[in-house]
Amino acid sequence: MAEDIEIRRKRLLHRSLYTGMKEVDILLGSFARRHLQTFTEVELDQYEALLENYDDPQIYAWAIGRDPVPPHLDTGVMKLLKSYKLPF
């Protein structure tokens, strides 16, 4: 049985808020609060794959532009994350 989309969004929000690295918690938690509710299933798949398959410090380095994003990860979600500005 497929996971309910709202449960999936809550699970991804929780994962975004508690990464184990404070800087990433702040960035991804804020990003997830802002965008998860409007993500399509495809965008949720992209975001979830990013969280599940890559280390938090590497995601952070891509998001802030310190490291180049590998071509296979240069999705709409990653572009949105790279352009995201914290609200404070």
Image (cartoon, grey):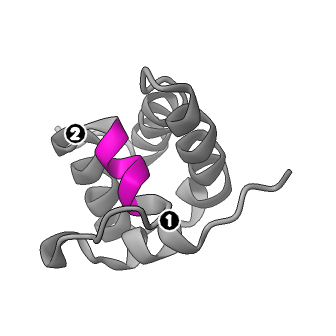
On screen, 58 above or below 40?
Answer: above
Specify the principal SS of the magenta part: helix
Can you say whether 84 is above or below 34 in the image?
A: below
Snapshot quadrant of residue 1: top left
**Mark 1, other Cα within 10 Å: few <14 / some 14–19 / many ≥20:** many
Where is residue 25? Give x, y as percent: 55, 33
Q: Position of residue 8 (x, y in %)?
A: 39, 40
Q: Secondary structure beneath disc 2?
A: helix
Label 1's element? Answer: helix
Q: Rounded to the nearest whole Å, what is the CA distance between mark 2 and mark 1?
A: 16 Å
| Residue at the extreme right | 88
Q: What residue type is labelled 2?
A: Glu
Quarter of image, res 42: bottom left
Residue in view at x 63 percent, y 37 percent: 26
Q: Which span of residues is magenta-colored? A: 57-62
**Amino acid type at image mark 1:** Leu
For this view, does 9 lie left or right of residue 71? right
Task: Tally the numbered discs.
Answer: 2
Residue hosting label 2: 52
- Please indicate whether residue 31 sits to the left or right of residue 45 in the image: right
Q: In this view, does 67 lie to the left or right of 77?
A: left
Q: Which mark is residue 81?
A: 1
Q: Which of marks 2 and 1 is nearer the N terminus?
A: 2
